[in-house]
Image: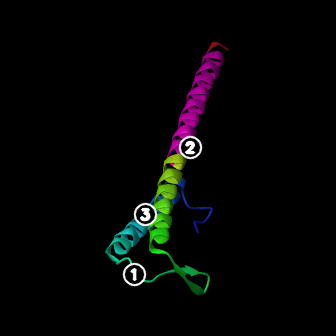
Amino acid sequence: MASSSTSPAIREMQRDLEVSDSIRFLGACVQELELVNDEANVYKLIGPVLVKQDLAEAKANVKKRIEYISAELKRMDRALKDLEEKQNGKKESIFKLQQKMQAVQAKA
């Protein structure tokens, strides 16, 4: 977990690495499942137990997880972009106010 002293840029890079690692791992899972013949046993780890799972269901679950993570990443990127735009707008407002204050002080 990132500490509170970690910069936002570093936290964002860590999040991106975690997400890309998850997507890469799930992509490898999809490739492995494609190699498995239809009669093979596929198991899903639920807590400390391996539970038998249908191959088609396993493939569908992994693909849905990839879609979910990708969609979540896009949503977070849009939210980050919106926040950056708001931040830039606030910076501009502050800069204009500072210029007005300097102009008023110069007249006084």
Q: Position of residue 59 (x, y in %)?
A: 44, 68
Instruction: Name the residue that disc number 2 marks.
Output: 79
Sequence-first disc among 3 and 1: 3
Contact (CB < 8 A) between labels 3 and 2?
no
What amino acid is found at the position of numbered circle 2 in the picture? Ala
- In the rendered structure, the answer to whether residue 69 lies left or right of residue 5 reads left
Instruction: Name the residue that disc number 1 marks.
Output: 39
Please tell me whether residue 21 is drawn above or below residue 42 in the rendered image.
above
Residue 53 in sight:
yes
Question: Residue at horizontal 62%, vertical 19%?
Answer: 100
First to last magenta residue range:
77-106
- In what element is the residue under mark 1? loop
Instruction: Name the residue that disc number 3 marks.
Output: 23
Q: Position of residue 103 (x, y in %)?
A: 60, 17
- Write down the quadrant of residue 21 in the picture: bottom left
> How far, Cα to Cα, is label 3 from label 1?
27 Å
